[in-house]
Image: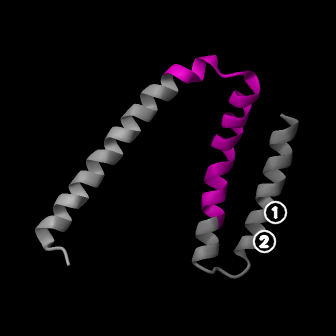
Amino acid sequence: MLGVGAMQKARHCLSLLAVAALTCGIWLLRGIYPVLPEPFLRTLAFACIILPFIGIGVALNTIKLRGYVPVFCGVFLLLAIVAGFI
């Protein structure tokens, strides 16, 4: 079993690894993004619109509010249809 000091050291190492991976990933994406084809850019733009709604739906489902999930799904479907026409 690990001691408290070893667990803190492991947590710090994992945090530094996460920061390093995110930094490298951001630099990589900054270089790749301008050369991506148009369908990929549209997909990324669509993902930026949809992911917050998916997060809200998951949060509503997690806290078990009765009746809110169908309402949210209906609003999401309506917004998706409107976004498809724009």
The colour mode here is one colour
Residue at the spot x=32%, y=39% of the render?
A: 20
- Circle on res. 58: none
Type of amino acid at the residue the image marks with label 1: Gly
Numbered label tally: 2
Which quarter of the picture shows residue 4? Answer: bottom left
48 is within the stretch colored magenta = yes
Instruction: Tell me residue 78's x, y (percent).
Output: 83, 53
Judged left or right of residue 4, residue 70 is: right
Quadrant housing the C terminus:
top right
24 is within the stretch colored magenta = no
The residue that mark 1 highlights is 74
Question: In terms of secondary structure, where does tag 1 sit?
Answer: helix
**Front-lying residue, 30 or 11:** 11
Residue at the spot x=73%, y=65% of the render?
A: 72
Instruction: Tell me residue 65's x, y (percent).
Output: 64, 79
Give yes or no for contact between labels 1 and 2 (Cβ–Cβ under 8 Å): yes
The residue that mark 2 highlights is 70
**Front-lying residue, 46 or 39:** 39
Residue at the spot x=59%, y=18% of the render?
A: 34
Q: Is residue 83 above or below residue 74?
A: above
Residue at the spot x=57%, y=78% of the render?
A: 63
Whole-angstrom CA distance, mark 1 to mark 2, is 6 Å
Magenta residues span 31-57
Instruction: Tell me residue 70's x, y (percent).
Output: 78, 71
Q: Residue furthest top?
A: 35
Q: Residue furthest front?
A: 1
Which quarter of the picture shows residue 2? Answer: bottom left
Quadrant housing the N terminus:
bottom left
Magenta stretch: dominant SS? Answer: helix
Type of amino acid at the residue the image marks with label 2: Pro
